[in-house]
Amino acid sequence: MKRNDIRGFILLTVGILFLWFLFYPQQAGFLGLYTRKYLLIIFGRASYIFPLVILWIGIKLLFNKKLNNTNLKLVSDILILWSLCIILSLATEDTPDKNFGGFIGKYSEIGVKKIVGNFGGWVLTLGVLIVSVFLTTGISFDDFSGFLSKLFKPRKRKLLSEPEEKPKELPKVIVPKPVEIKKEEPEILNKQKEPRIIKEKPAIKSEQGFQTKEKKRESSKPQENTAKYELPSPELLDEPKKVETQVVEDELRGCADKLIKTLADFDISATIDSINPGPVITRYDIILAPGTKVNSIINLSNDIALTMKTESIRVLAPIPGKSAVGIEIPNPKQAIVGIKDIITSKKFTESKSLLNFAIGKTTAGEPFCDDLAPMPHLLIAGSTGSGKSVCINSIIMSLLFRAKPDELKFLLIDPKRLELPIYENIPHLYVPGKKPENVSVITDAKEAANALKLLVKVMEHRYKAFAKKAVRNIDGYNELM
């Protein structure tokens, strides 16, 4: 092995070690920690140039390249490091951390500024850095300028030498003849079942409350004080406000005519296919004339909203299962969705799950509910005043109207002490290890943490019981008991 090869390997090893010391001091041991510390104190951030210079020299030695003018290159390497220290110190003199250039950069900066001033210090230091880089790399100024000329000349030559081409004739645009708008009265969907008016009797109305279709579930440990418990009746809830059907229909037809005229003003021919009224918005299903692009409506959403005197509209293009485009427009008078409308609907009453809860109504005015069991985690988020508390109360009320205390338990935590005190005396409250008469809504943080820990133990105990019976959930377990 040649002497240069040995030197090259040594320099590569030292360079890699310096990189390790500088970037991973906590994993580099005692030597690496203190080496990095003193390098940064002396040279500041410029000390990161050390490993790169050492690696570069080692690679040149390994490839058998003779280093001519070794002393000159060594001096140029030192000047590069020195000038970088000064530049970092000059650039960060107004920052809280003034040690970017290290000890050398700080005091060299003071000396240079006394001799040539601040601006002169920048000029002198940058000049020394550029000359030192040329000496170290062996690149001449001619080579550098030639590289720049090759980089920019081809593009310039191409731009100057492009022959002038005659502009191509644009293809003639064939404008289709506008289709006449048929002024037909739009058919209102669910005319007999107006979303804002309850025309049908509630699915279940009795003093006995709700009775689901599935057979009665019995817990493994029924409570004596809940044996005669009766579910609350939906009659306890307030009736929703009624709206005159004819007035609603007239408003919807007037809005539909205005929408068609608005589209015609933008040269879009369309007819109303159907109207789907909801409590907050109404969806107007329109059929576009042949040759009309759907994007033409999407691109005009803001203009249509301005003409319709509403904040915004939403375009459904196309509606799944239909060859129509839906335009959702906010209602001038938004209806309040009452929980009674949802829990008396067939979708809610015919559900077999005890954890089925009311959510609200769809944009088409249909009752919407869901089952908590397959989730089973639920996060309710929103801005202030967006309805988080209303949603939580709706969920709790939905479950109270369906499940008895021996079928469902609540562990309620309310640190604010404002949202859940109304449920203080319900028999469904549960805290592991406490008697039913001593259970209340938890408001203390430490008590809440302890209750949750106990609840985890209850859950683990249930999992073991499920495993012994080879069942996956509490429904399967109750069927075997």
Image (tube, rainbow, N blue to C red):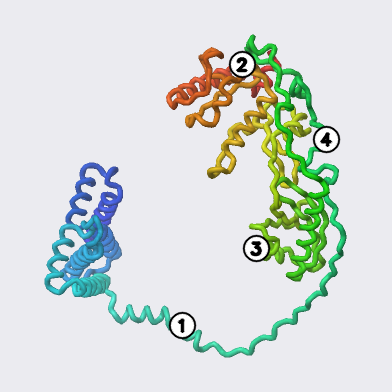
Numbered disc in front, either 2 or 1: 2
**Mark 3 surroundings: few (<14), some (14-19) or many (≥20) residues within 10 A:** some
For label 3, the SS is helix
Q: Which of marks 2 and 4 precedes in the sequence?
A: 4
Observer-nearest of 425 and 42: 425
Q: Which residue is mark 2?
A: 468
Amino acid type at image mark 2: Lys
Amino acid type at image mark 1: Pro
Q: Which of marks 1 and 2 precedes in the sequence?
A: 1
Q: Which residue is mark 1?
A: 154
Observer-nearest of 15 and 231: 231
Q: Tell me if label 1 and label 4 are in contact, CB under 8 Å.
A: no
Q: Which of marks 3 and 4 precedes in the sequence?
A: 4
Q: Which residue is mark 3?
A: 302
Numbered disc in front, either 1 or 3: 3
**Mark 2 surroundings: few (<14), some (14-19) or many (≥20) residues within 10 A:** few
Numbered disc in front, either 1 or 4: 4
- Rounded to the nearest angstrom, the CA distance separating label 1 from label 4 is 80 Å
On residue 200, which mark appears? Answer: 4
For label 4, the SS is loop
Name the residue at 30% across, 51% down: 23
**Mark 4 surroundings: few (<14), some (14-19) or many (≥20) residues within 10 A:** few
Q: Which of marks 2 and 3 precedes in the sequence?
A: 3
Name the residue at 79% across, 68% down: 291
Observer-nearest of 196 and 71: 196
**Residue 415 shows in the view:** yes
Task: Tell me the quadrant of the picture where the C terminus can be found.
Answer: top right
Q: Tell me if label 1 and label 3 are in contact, CB under 8 Å.
A: no
Task: Tell me the quadrant of the picture where the N terminus can be found.
Answer: bottom left
Amino acid type at image mark 3: Asn
Amino acid type at image mark 4: Glu
